[in-house]
Image: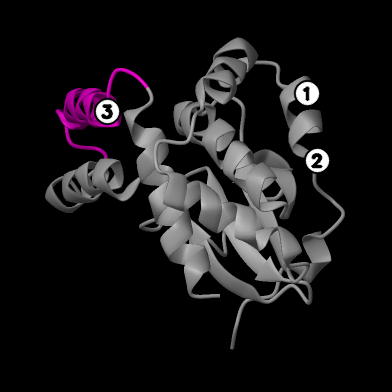
Amino acid sequence: MKKNVAHKFGQGLTPRQFVESMTQNQQAFESWYERFAWENEEDKAFFESLNHRDDLRVLILAADWCGDVVRNVPVVFRILETAGIKTEVLILEDNQDLMDDFLTMGGRSVPIVIVADTGGYVLGQWGPRPAHVQSLMVAFKQENPDREAPDYESRIAEVRKAMGQAYGEGTESHAVIASELRSLLSGL
């Protein structure tokens, strides 16, 4: 049976409300938002073509303390603005019931972008980070299942550094996120 998130519609923040309510990382978030630019005109045209659709809704599970939220959600906001898709942000700490339906490898990782129809039926999801960055964490967790291991913290610090390098110095990941979201939405 498909997941349904209709009970969460109208409970979230608008993208602007989310940014205004941030108590951490607001300046960095806004900087990534301002730095977004379309690198692929075909991606831009695809998202512009969605403006006529009124059958899609997006919920984003997020937390302002999370580095992946700060890096990825501004890009997602810009893409969804271009698409004209109604978007709400649900704060992780206030929506753990929903978060538990969208775990990543058994853990609560954000952001999670949930695409649903107007009835709330989930059509797809994206997150918590671009696939090439997430693959590093997947490999790490497979190789390091014991969180109590004496070297776990130093090893996770190493993989987090590698993930930062995989994101790139600038906006390289923005085009990747656009492409991944296009792949997700193109089948709907």
In magenta, the rendered stretch is: 147-170
State the residue at coordinates (62%, 18%).
30
Cβ–Cβ under 8 Å for marks 2 and 3: no
Q: Is residue 113 above or below residue 65?
A: below
- Out of 64 and 45, give the one closest to the viewer: 45
| Amino acid marked by disc 2 | Leu
Q: How is the image coloured?
A: one colour
Q: CA distance from mark 2 to mark 3?
A: 29 Å
| Amino acid marked by disc 3 | Arg
Q: Measured from the top left, where is residue 48 in percent x and y? A: 62, 53
| Amino acid marked by disc 1 | Ser
State the residue at coordinates (23%, 22%).
161
Tell me the SS state at disc 2.
loop
- Out of 156 and 168, give the one closest to the viewer: 168
Tell me the SS state at disc 3.
helix
Residue bearing mark 3: 160
> What crowding class fits label 3: few (fewer than 14 Cα within 10 Å), some (14-19), or many (20 or more)?
some
Q: Quarter of the image for the C terminus: give it.
A: bottom right
In the image, taking residue 23 as reference, residue 29 lies left or right, namely left
Q: Measured from the top left, where is residue 165 in percent x and y? A: 22, 24
Q: Which one is closest to the eye, mark 2 or mark 3?
A: 2
Residue bearing mark 2: 13
- Out of 89 and 105, give the one closest to the viewer: 89
The mark that comes first in sequence, 2 or 1, is: 2
Tell me the SS state at disc 1.
helix
Residue bearing mark 1: 21
